[in-house]
Image: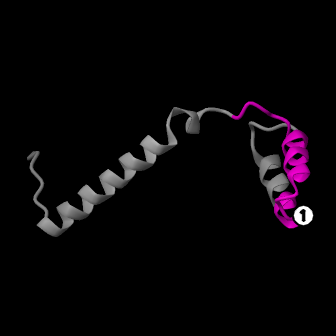
Amino acid sequence: MSATVTITKTQYEALKRRAKAYERIVSAAGAEFFTSPPVRSTKAVISAMRKTKHYSPAFLKSLEVGLSRSRHFTR
């Protein structure tokens, strides 16, 4: 079984661009991106977001539905 793979220069350059983009995303996100949120209460999250008055009722309802499906968040 051969360990050599041959691809075109165009394919190589595309893969290289994707790898660099991925590295930038991971670097920008940092370790905190992959940690659990400090608050586990769906009600607390929705309440805090509602108080900012930056989010529409439809968005908050959609978020509440999404969080209710999460194993991390409680009601």
**Residue at the image position 25 percent from the left and 64 percent from the top:** 14
Color scheme of the displayed model: one colour
Q: Is residue 58 magenta?
A: yes
Q: Is residue 55 left or right of residue 29?
A: right
**Residue at the image position 80 percent from the left and 55 percent from the top:** 63
Image position of 64 with respect to 7: above or below: above
What range of the chain is rendered magenta? 37-61
**Residue at the image position 20 percent from the left and 62 percent from the top:** 13
Question: Split into 4 quadrants, where in the image is the C terminus?
Answer: top right
**Residue at the image position 83 percent from the left and 55 percent from the top:** 65
Q: Is residue 66 left or right of residue 4?
A: right
Which residue is nearer to you in this view: 55 or 74?
A: 55
Q: Is residue 55 left or right of residue 36?
A: right
Residue 20 visible in the picture: yes
Dot 1: what SS? helix
Q: Position of residue 46 (x, y in %)?
A: 87, 48
Mark 1 sits on what residue? Answer: 57
Q: Position of residue 43 (x, y in %)?
A: 91, 42
The three-letter code of the residue at mark 1 reads: Pro
Image position of 58 with respect to 51: above or below: below
Q: Give the quarter of the image for residue 70.
A: top right
Q: Is residue 55 magenta?
A: yes
